[in-house]
Every structure is written in C-alpha cells, then in structure tokens.
Amino acid sequence: MAAPSGAASCEDFAEFQELLRVMRTIDDRIVHELNTTIPTASFVGKIDAGQTCKELYQSLMDAHTSRERIIKNCIAQTSSVVKTLREEREKAQDDLALLKQLRKEQTKLKLMQSELNVEEVVN
C-alpha cells in the first residue's frame, strides 16, 4: 500500500491537507494491514510472516518520511513567501491588499507547522 509520491502543492492549503489525508491512509488502516499481513494458522507455512512484516514496516517508514519531507518543503516555501511579503510590506505600509495577503500566508504557515505536530502523533 504505497502512498502517493507526487509533488505537493503548497499554494492551496486544502489541497495540501487532502494530500496528507490520502498519504495517511496506511496509518489509518494499520489494524487491517496487520490482520492481513500476519498469517492465520492454516497459512503459516505458505507465507513468510517475518518478511511480510518487514515490508509493512518499511512501507510505514517510507510513508512517514515522505509526509514529513512534503510538510517541511511546504513550510520552507511558505516561509519564503511570508518573508518576501514582509519585505514588500515594509516598503509599502499603506497597501491593504498586501497586508491581507501577508496575513493569509502567515495563517497558512501556522497551519502547515501544526501539521508537523499532527504527523508526530500519527507516527
């Protein structure tokens, strides 16, 4: 059960959250995965439970690493945008549209940073 590894869109927070939700499916279904990974008594000789568990574990670790990388990448991108907007705001104090955009990006940055905490709990 591989997670999607496509490039994350950091522009739209809703899309970012949806990508993470899809990528967390393996964690959400861990009980099912364990139940289907560990063989019943009748299949013990036919399936290598140790190898299957190792593969499941590796799949989980890959998913965790991928999600963390995506979250940190989006945080870095959004931080850069916030920094640029702050610099522009210092030059144009009266620009309300710029202030609104800055606040929007700051809020998005805080939400993305909170996703790191969510990821820690999920892991």
Image (cartoon, rainbow, N blue to C red):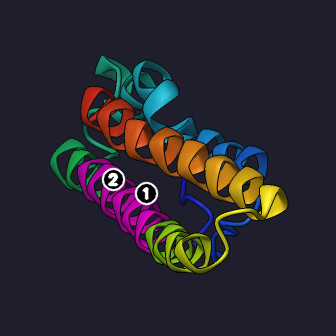
Which kind of residue does numbered mark 2 sit on?
A: His
Q: Is 58 or 104 nearer to us in this picture?
A: 104
96 relative to 34 in the view: left or right? right
Mark identifier at residue 92: none
Q: Position of residue 105 (x, y in %)?
A: 62, 56
How many other residues sit within 10 Å of disc 2, few (<14), some (14-19) or many (≥20)? many
Q: Is residue 106 above or below residue 7?
A: above
Q: Residue furthest left?
A: 50
Mark identifier at residue 64: 2
Q: CA distance from mark 1 to mark 2?
A: 5 Å
How many other residues sit within 10 Å of disc 1, few (<14), some (14-19) or many (≥20)? many
Which kind of residue does numbered mark 1 sit on?
A: Arg
Q: Position of residue 41 (x, y in %)?
A: 29, 19
Q: Position of residue 108 (x, y in %)?
A: 60, 48
Q: Which residues are magenta?
A: 56-76
Which residue is drawn at the image coordinates 50% and 75% (left, top)?
77
Q: Where does label 1 land, which residue?
A: 67
Total count of labels: 2
Q: Is residue 74 magenta?
A: yes
* Majority secondary structure of magenta residues: helix
Which residue is drawn at the image coordinates 65% and 76% (left, top)?
6
Q: Residue furthest right?
A: 97
Q: Is 97 or 108 nearer to us in this picture?
A: 97
Circle 2 — which element? helix
Which residue is drawn at the image coordinates 50% and 26% (left, top)?
28
Which residue is drawn at the image coordinates 69% and 48% (left, top)?
104
For the residues bearing labels 1 and 2, Cβ distance under 8 angstroms = yes
Q: Is 54 or 29 nearer to us in this picture?
A: 29
Of the 4 image quadrants, the one containing the C terminus is: top left
Circle 1 — which element? helix
